[in-house]
Image: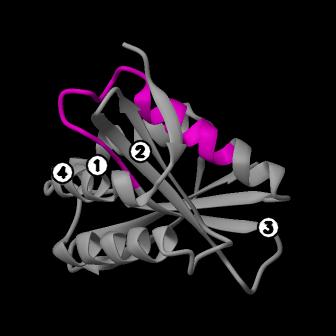
Amino acid sequence: MDIQVERLTEATLDGAVETIRSLPEFFYERDFVKAEANYREFVSGHKDDDLFLVARSGDQLLGVVGATKRQDADGVYFLASFAVKKGQRGGGIGRRLLESLEGELAARDGRMMYTETTTASYCDSTRAFYEAVGYTMVAEVPDFWADGDPLALYQKRL
């Protein structure tokens, strides 16, 4: 399969929203609302410090990834959105998206990337993925997302 990674645009916006919404087992509704708002702001040019990318094969959108810049820290980004469609996971699309994002952010003098997930068992594969691509868990906060759903904070030097 020929996969292209490119910036999120108006033409790929609906596919990006559909992609993240296709994974309700990993996100709360508020996450979908925030992701869509971030996508729309980026596409409209209101988030110049942020970066959102999509992976596609032909007309089919396969995944989306994005990072927002912390304004109070030098070169620090947070992974704001990351999703690969069901049926496409495990084929290297996520790795390619994340490596493309990290490369572009490093070229912008980005020095650190943080991502948040949970230590709850439903995200075991998510944590394993982050660790496989060089992220290290630096903090865990109990009952963060909801009662019984702890935060796992991961970090990677770009």
What is the crowding at mark 3: few (fewer than 14 residues within 10 Å), some, or many (at least 20)?
Answer: some
Does the segment drawn in magenta span residue 90? yes
Give the structural element (helix, strand or loop) at label 4: loop
- Whether tag 1 and tag 4 are in contact, CB under 8 A, the answer is no
Compared to 139, does 37 lie above or below?
A: below
What is the crowding at mark 4: few (fewer than 14 residues within 10 Å), some, or many (at least 20)?
Answer: some
Say which of marks 3 and 1 sits in front.
Answer: 3
Compared to 95, does 38 lie above or below?
A: below
Compared to 106, does 58 lie above or below?
A: above
Which three-letter amino acid code belongs to the residue tagged 4?
Answer: Leu
Say which of marks 2 and 4 sits in front.
Answer: 4
Percent of width and height locating residue 123 = 28, 49
The residue tagged 2 is: 127
Q: Is residue 155 left or right of residue 2?
A: right
Percent of width and height locating residue 27 = 23, 63
Chain part drawn in magenta: 82-102
Which three-letter amino acid code belongs to the residue tagged 3?
Answer: Gly
The residue tagged 3 is: 75
**Residue at left 31%, top 71%?**
36
What is the crowding at mark 1: few (fewer than 14 residues within 10 Å), some, or many (at least 20)?
Answer: some
Looking at the image, tell me whether mark 3 or mark 2 is earlier in sequence order. 3
Residue 118 seen in the current view? no
Which three-letter amino acid code belongs to the residue tagged 1?
Answer: Cys
